[in-house]
């Protein structure tokens, strides 16, 4: 037994012992009272009977002091005869001449004034011990008998002892059972206290063994539930904390990225402008070239700020989509036709693979254009000359039963390493920074694509085998999608 269990056990046992003691004391008190009263009543009746007999004896009738003394001794009872006025006429144990008037004694008052048997117990002034007095009236006054009460007390003592012994014997199994139960109770209470201590130390993994019944079992169960809830909450908070950390990192990265992306073209513009002002403006072999570089960087800045604006509008959801139903084949053909001249410049075959004739999607046509042109722009950028690109659409049914169209843009280009695929849709994420920049990219295209698609309730993903090309997929709803269920 541990220290704590021992302490609890002793306390419980102490309480039980106190209870048993109180029960014993009250049993004793009641039993002795009952026995005493019973014995006294019994004695009283006996003395009254004796008195009736004595009243008929010669000794009493003649008030024969010597005979009365003799009689009293023989029945171990003090006999007193009192006149109507209380004067003692005869007494078996004292000289009546020296005795005071007895009219005031309660038992005699009852006998003399109310003419019935009176009784009282008190310490005799004459003989100095506690006596039971019984007085009864007769023609000349009253006869009083008295015997010491000590006999009663002895009897009561014997009865008390017997009762106490049997009660104590009866309590013995109760005490043993109580000890056993309190030991078990103490063990369980100290288990629960130890468990609460674990919880207080934030160890929410700990569990109390189940299976206990009763209030303590219920308490244990509730504590376990509390631990489960706390563990879950803590985990949730940890996840949220990690997510906040991640978002904070993303935000910082974003700020750094934006400043960096802005600074590079600005520095270039500033540098070439100064060079021109410093004289290059009049050097025909340089001025056009420098002005072209300035224009190129200005375009880049314009594109960058436009992309950033689009992104922030999408993220803040201030971008308003104008939804309507459009034919899939028409929409796709429009974008493909716009991009085709750029592809042709590099001998890339750009092919539109028509889907089901009349299928439609419910979308913002401007956003759709932006999505597909971004994907085609990438496909052209990251496919070597003479490559092959195709774009098409297929019907797609989601798990929830809703109808969607899945678009794809497939190229025969460099492809994307698997390790980069999950992060591809993050802002500023580029697989090969230098190459992407050289191609005029800022890494915002796919982030915009993702936001636009999500704004329609759709999803975007990529499949790629490096060296063999990449395929980008995205879905658009056939009918108005419940955007609440698929928040951007
Ligand atoms: N079809 C593709 N084939 C190979 N890599 C691709 C393809 N599309 C995208 N990528 C990779 O994903 C990166 C991110 O693309 P994203 O469109 O976001 O940026 P970008 O094309 O570099 O710049 P932007 O589109 O903003 O002009 C690209 O830098 C490139 O490394
Ligand atoms: Mg791009």
Image (spheres, grey):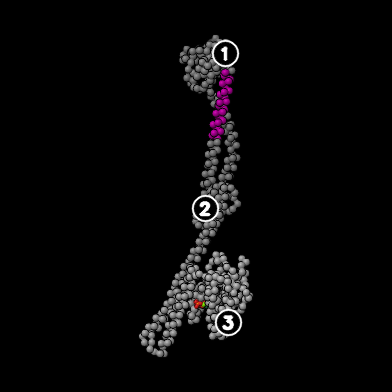
Residue occupying the point 59% across, 69% down? 479
Q: Which mark is residue 350?
A: 3
User: Quick one: 229 or 39, which is closer to the camera?
Assistant: 229
Local crowd size for mark 2, using a 10 Å CA cut-off: few (<14), some (14–19), many (≥20): some
User: Where residue 34 sits: x, y (%)?
Assistant: 56, 28
User: Quick one: 332 or 211, which is closer to the camera?
Assistant: 332
Q: Taking the image as drawn, is residue 464 in sight?
A: no
Q: Please, what secondary structure does the residue beneath circle 2 have? A: helix
For disc 2, the marked residue is 196
Q: Is residue 54 above or below residue 276?
A: above
Circle nearer the viewer, 3 or 1: 3
Residue 218 painted magenta: no
User: Where residue 244 sits: x, y (%)?
Assistant: 48, 65
- Work out how far the residue at label 3 is from the one at label 1, CA to CA, in angstroms: 148 Å
Quarter holding residue 40: top right
Q: Which mark is residue 55?
A: 1
Q: Which residues are magenta?
A: 24-48
- Work out how far the residue at label 1 is from the one at label 2, CA to CA, in angstroms: 83 Å
Residue occupying the point 54% across, 41% down? 16
Q: Taking the image as drawn, is residue 120 in sight?
A: yes
């Amino acid at each position: 037994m541990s220290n704590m269990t021992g302490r609890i056990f002793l306390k419980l046992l102490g309480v039980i012992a106190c209870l048993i003691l109180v029960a014993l004391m009250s049993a004793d008190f009641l039993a002795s009272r009952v026995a005493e009263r019973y014995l006294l009543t019994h004695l009283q009746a006996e003395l009254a009977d004796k008195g009736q007999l004595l009243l008929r004896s010669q000794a009493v009738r003649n008030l024969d002091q010597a005979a009365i003394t003799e009689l009293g001794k023989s029945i171990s009872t003090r006999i007193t005869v009192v006149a109507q006025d209380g004067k003692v006429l005869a007494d078996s144990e004292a000289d009546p001449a020296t005795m005071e008037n007895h009219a005031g004694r309660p038992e005699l008052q009852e006998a003399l004034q109310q003419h019935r048997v009176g009784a009282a117990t008190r310490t005799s002034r004459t003989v100095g011990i506690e006596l039971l007095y019984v007085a009864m009236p007769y023609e000349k006054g009253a006869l009083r008998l008295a015997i010491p009460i000590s006999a009663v007390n002895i009897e009561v003592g014997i009865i008390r002892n017997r009762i106490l012994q049997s009660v104590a014997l009866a309590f013995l199994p109760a005490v043993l059972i109580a000890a056993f139960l309190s030991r078990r109770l103490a063990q369980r209470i100290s288990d629960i206290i130890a468990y609460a201590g674990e919880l207080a130390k934030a160890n929410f993994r700990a569990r109390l063994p189940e299976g206990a019944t009763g209030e303590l079992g219920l308490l244990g169960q509730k504590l376990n539930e509390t631990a489960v809830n706390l563990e879950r909450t803590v985990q949730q908070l940890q996840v949220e904390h990690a997510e906040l950390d991640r978002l904070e990192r993303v935000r910082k990265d974003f700020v750094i990225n934006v400043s960096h992306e802005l600074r590079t073209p600005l520095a270039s513009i500033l540098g070439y402008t100064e060079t021109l002002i410093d004289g290059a403006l009049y050097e025909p072999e340089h001025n056009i070239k420098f002005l072209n570089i300035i224009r190129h960087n200005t375009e880049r800045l314009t594109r960058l700020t436009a992309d950033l604006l689009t992104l922030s509008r999408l993220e803040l959801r201030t971008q308003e989509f104008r939804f309507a139903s459009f034919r899939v084949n028409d929409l796709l053909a429009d974008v493909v036709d716009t991009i085709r001249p750029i592809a042709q410049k590099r001998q890339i075959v750009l092919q539109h693979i028509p889907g089901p004739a009349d299928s439609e999607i419910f979308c913002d046509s401007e956003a759709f254009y932006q999505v597909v042109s971004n994907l085609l722009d990438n496909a052209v950028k990251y496919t070597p000359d003479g490559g092959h690109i195709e774009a098409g659409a297929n019907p797609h049914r989601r798990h929830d039963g809703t109808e969607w169209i899945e678009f794809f843009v497939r190229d025969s280009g460099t492809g994307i390493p698997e390790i980069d695929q999950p992060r591809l849709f993050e802002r500023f994420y580029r697989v090969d920074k230098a190459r992407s920049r050289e191609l005029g990219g800022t890494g915002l295209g796919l982030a915009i694509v993702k936001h636009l698609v999500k704004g329609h309730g759709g999803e975007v993903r990529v499949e790629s085998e490096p060296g063999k090309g990449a395929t980008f997929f995205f879905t658009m709803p056939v009918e108005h999608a419940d955007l609440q269920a698929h928040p951007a």
